[in-house]
Amino acid sequence: MQEKYTAFIEKYEKALHKQSQISNRISFLRLLLALLLVFSLYKTFTQEPILPYLVADLVLIITFVVLLKIHQKNALQRKLTQTLLQINKAEYDYLTENKKTWYDGASYINPQHDYSYDLDIFGTESLYHHLNRTATEAGKYALAQELLSHNTSQQILKKQKATDELAKEVVWRQEFYALAKMVSDLPDNEQKLRHWAKQNHISIHRKWQYVAYISPILFFLNLLLVYVFEIRIVPVYFFFILNLVIAYAHLKPLLKESLNMGRIFQTMQFYKRLFEKIEEANFQSETLQQLQKQLKTSEYKASAEIARLGNALGQLDSISNILASVVFNGTLLYHLHIYFSVIRWKRQYAHLLPLWLDTVGTFEAISSVANHTFNHPHYVFPELNETHRFEFSDLGHPLIMKNGVRNDFHLGSKQMILLTGSNMSGKSTFLRTIGINLTLAQVGAKICATKATLCPIRVVTSMRQFDSLSSGESYFFAEIKRLKHIMEQLTERPCFVLLDEILRGTNSDDKQQGTKGVLVKLLSLSAQGILATHDLEICKMAEQYPQLNNFRFEGQIIDNELYFDYKLKSGVCTNKSATFLMKKLEIIS
């Protein structure tokens, strides 16, 4: 996979070098044209006849403007190429050195959630940190919600098809991501755009819309009468001043629309290209096609409409240019017309704007999952069943990039595993391996296994609790509440339960009796899952309850060193690694 990113890096480095050369050449030509234009203008005012020089002036000005447009287009393409180069370098560094430059989703950490806190879904080195290839706020939120949601088998299958389709469209994904990053380079504009869409505009009476047409017409008719027919009814400047009075009488709403949006209209040019990427694609999966229809219907194309709004807001922003404002409003009531066009747009499309932005965010989320699929071609899409079977071959932790140990794992309907092993043997890591892979399956991603079949039921966990000074809760009481929550969830729906050494906040006898009671209750609710424990008495419950099976992670002492192979084995762990370590470190004799 690294070779593919290396090829992309070389491709974009060559393209960037070529674009830089073009930019330098255009800059030189613009300078040359500017000098020629100065010379030609000088000749225009000092030489006779002036017609050849006027023609030369016009040609030079037109050529300069054309070059300026080419330069702007090349500059935008060069920025896009630079961003694509950064994207591929970041992916290469991620695969080779596990470097992550993406947002880690720390703001979405919620210790009360069913599983996200225990499974490290958010935060540094989390699943979100590894997956995230979003740039917009809508994209970051959409990816977080995907990782927190529960889906049916049918929904997951649709997500798998969408993920698989986008995983193969590497260039499309990266260009889409690059454009989204260019949008996010202009901070807070997305939120400003959403706020603007919700905000009520200051209405102007309909009569002023008629005046906005009639008064400029009267201005030009008066000019015609005075200078062509030499008929002077009112002074030449009368309607000019009248237009200025009309325009500046409505200055408050004009400035409100202009200042509220700032220079956000520039962002809309990037959104236009983002929308176009979606609208022009030939998607095959149902999920992507449905999302595409949110931007492109028989009545509108979001890209065209956002471009129209951007152009209008850009023109409205020129009201801050005093000279242009006086000239254009005095003759045409220009900014009043632009304001009316913005309001018409707002009435027609403002309610759709959040949907369009959210659609981009959803595509970013799917593209992030697709990027994970592309980066891990040896992972597999799990098969789905409704019989509550969980079977994994060579299952590994998807966040352990190198030297991860793989295990086979099988769990039947209404079965639970009692998992034993000393600290450091891999019990907690294995619980998270199960939980994170089940989370990946929910979002339609490939999981870290060579073969897998699972039932998409909700995951609930109790693996790490904490004291809460603000609510006055102890660690022990927080865990009790958590266990109560798990039982409530199981009464409503089937759940896959992951419990790691529960009831640590009480004495050993109370803990043992409490754990046995929890297990009996779980079995009565037909729970599936794993309970990790150090208590060998708990493991004896498998003799009484056939739904329970004992598995272990075992340590070995080799050449007076404690060694863990992190391989899952059947049975109960009975070794005394803690005693060995304390003797080795001369803590005990």
Image: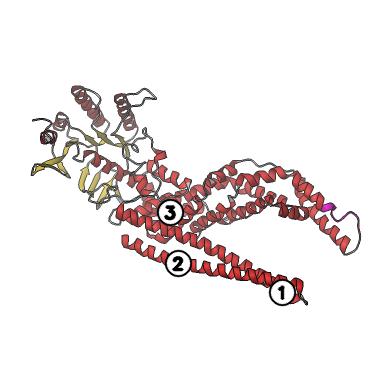
In this figure, which residue is indicated by the disc labeled 3? 286
Which residue lies under the disc numbered 1?
55
CA gap, disc 1 and disc 3? 58 Å
| Residue interval drawn in magenta | 232-239
Quadrant where the N terminus lies?
bottom left
Marks 1 and 3: CB-CB under 8 Å? no
Q: Position of residue 227 (x, y in %)?
A: 87, 63
Q: Nearer the viewer, mark 1 or mark 3?
A: 1
Kindly identify the amino acid type of the residue bearing the numbered disc 3. Glu
Q: CA distance from mark 2 to mark 1?
A: 37 Å
Q: Which residue is mark 2?
A: 17
| Residue located at (42% from left, 67% from top) | 14
| Earlier-in-chain disc, 1 versus 3 | 1
Q: Which of the pair 261/477 is nearer the observer?
A: 261
Q: Position of residue 56 (x, y in %)?
A: 69, 74
> In terms of secondary structure, where does tag 2 sit?
helix
Q: Nearer the viewer, residue 455 or 331?
A: 331
Give the side of residue 55 with respect to residue 176, left or right: right
Residue in the picture at 23% in, 42% down:
430
